Image (cartoon, grey):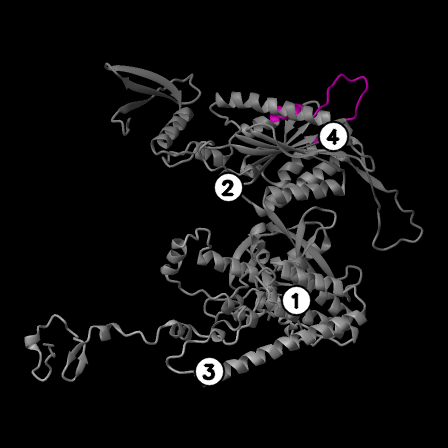
Amino acid sequence: MEYVIQAPENWKVGININMRNETESVEPVILLDLPLEGDVTKTIEISVKKFHLLRQRTAILLKNFKIKLDVMDLAQLPKIFPSNHKTVFLLDHTPYFGISCGVNLEFGYTKGRPGFIPLSPISKSLWTCAVEAAMDYCRIVWDLFPEGKLIRFVISDSSARTLNTWAPDQQNIYQVFGSLSGCGAPPKLNANSQTEFSVIHGFRTAVEAMCECSEVQHRKRTSLNENAMELLNRCRMICITSARDNESVKNLEDIFQNELIRTNRVASASDHLVAVDYCHLIILNVFPNPTHSSVTGHPTIQRSSILTTEVYSVAAGTQLAAKMTDLLLMHYNLASTTVIGIPMKEEQNASSSANYNVELFHAADAHTALLKSNPQELSQISSLKEGACYETITLKWCTPRNNNMADLHNCTTLHRITPAEVNSRPSACLITFLLNGRTVMLETPRRVGTKGMSHMLTSYGGEIFIQTLNTGRSVLEDPPAISEGVGGRVTDYRINDFGLLMQQNRLVPLKRRYLSEKLANGNKDIDLPLEKAKKRLEKFTKYWPLTMSSNMIFNHKQLTEPLISNMLKDELTQEEILQCKQCIYNLISMEAKNEPLPSISSSLHRGKGPKREEQYRALWTELESFIKLHNYSNDHSEIISCLVECRKKPESMIKLEKIEIEQALKGYEHDREQMMQRDTVIRTTFDSPMSPVSNAAQSGTENGKISIKHKSVYEFFMSKKNRNEKLAGELKAVPTSIGYITRLYPQIPDSDLPQTVKPIVEQ
């Protein structure tokens, strides 16, 4: 059989494969005949596994599969080759783990016996606590991932022992429990014995177990598919032991790293093993209660390109179990859901019932839709698990129903679930209830509004799943209104104010001649119109609350205008400054007279509102923040100083200043009326087609600070146009017998004109 590999460089290699039948050969051997230059052939003897690996890498090279770590996107590595595919538990079985954990367990009976002497409390050993925590870790993993997530156990005392293999038939609780029962309790320490007990004996066995191929890795390694990717062996090891101090932990990390490097050299030269490309080492330092350990631990540290380590120091018992659960959720991307309000009959009294809570573990993707919802609603259903470092989502039990095809819901995801406490009575009742063919709806608790169904618990083929319901809108429904928020709740958005904001910042096209004229005049530092529009929009939105319930000054515009509008201007006239001060004095006068602020009609404000003092306090605080944000000139600073000083002045002085401001504004109003009357008289007396446009009509006053009339664009254009200016056609008109006529088609000669219309030629 001959393989011919044609490369772009027009060279080829003919590989003749011959099977050599030798009885002393352990496995088949392949002879590779490589034709070289000068009719020379070189024969290479290689094993079958190495040939498959060579063929695989050659195909990858010719098809430009850049799978090496320095080329491949490192962010995709954990998804393609996850570290949780192979996990090794190394349990310390030394005599130290035979001591008590320090947590006493009391014995009780459901029905008291008269005259019965209670038993003395007992306590678990460190070994029992470590085994229970590790086995609960495995139970959850194997419940949620029947395939693809492999776990092996290695115990170490005077030597290392392996309790199971990577074979699928040994990846179950019964196999591991059976092997653990043969190990027994940790041996007792004998002072005369020369036996050395240490967890270090298990390092080599654990690393060698990582180098062994699982069935999935073996299929990928020996695959004949030319598109196959190079195998990366990424693993994790969890070591449960006890150390004296941080220096002892560092020595354990160094010994493991040296053992990993040594075993990788052996695996690279072996046909049966695969080197470890990455290893995540977790060391759990366990100590009894109520003592304290000198080991402080450290977060994840990158010790080399193939090894990262992290150390935790926890007390035996509930703390160890909680820490193992935290690691489990991180390692397998899981989440917690607590179902509350489950009605169950009391064990002692079957006639009464009580509500219980059950915690469930599942894939974190089941909470994706909830995490994208309103943050306020999410904070109501999310809470930190008591005694742990992870959060759980609280969902409420809803009326169950039988599985029926008519009750199918629009589900987006489906994931397996498993209870956090498998031996508790509420968990057992819930699991039994679901396995009997019942379906349970879960809803998100809300303070107001209708309930919202978010998830559903059901069983298929003896396995229990959680399904995420589609809580969003269907494409067949009408689009939501602008006042409709998340979950269909009516909000109090400032819709009218938003429309006014758009009108105030509307963009219009501008001719290029405007910019070219500015540049021609030497104004190179002028802002472009787009930049001016951005600055204006930024100024108007520096303080702009989205809802009416989150502000005070915009809800009481009858009290705060024209203060708000004037503060948005770049410069203020003296009259505008007095108007702003008048608004401030009016508010102070209302507060001194104990006048309540005008009520706001809103569907969200129910019952009694805040007190009058709290309303004024919120109004002043918000008004001061708004004014300070819009401090653009010395005139604006004068408004800020007025607001701050007025809050400190006595009421009598405020009244006097208020009267002075009102008189000054009346003077401005009187001057404005006189100006308007004078302008009316001028236009009535002297207005004619030949009269020029008055300066007062254009600029208002000499200083240009008071505007008399707002003109439209058309009126402004017509006012600038010279009324005596003749049109272009009038300038080209030719005198005729009937008057001046402009030729529509000048290219037509005079001979072709009608006889009734002849041009008059001056002699």
**Residue 470 x %, y %:** 53, 62
Which of pointers 1 and 3 lies earlier in the amino acid sequence? 1
Q: Which residue is mark 4?
A: 242
Q: What label sits on residue 79 in the rendered view?
A: 2
Query: Farthest residue toward the left?
Result: 751
**Residue 33 x %, y %:** 30, 19
Indicate the amino acid at tag 3. Arg
Residue 736 in magenta?
no
Q: Which residues are magenta?
A: 183-205
**Residue 573 x %, y %:** 60, 67
Residue 202 in magenta?
yes
Residue at horizontal 58%, vertical 69%? Answer: 494
Indicate the amino acid at tag 2. Lys
Query: Farthest residue toward the right?
Result: 115
Q: Are marks 2 and 3 in contact (CB under 8 Å)?
A: no
Q: Which residue is mark 3?
A: 683
Q: Are marks 1 and 4 in contact (CB under 8 Å)?
A: no
Q: Are marks 2 and 1 in contact (CB under 8 Å)?
A: no
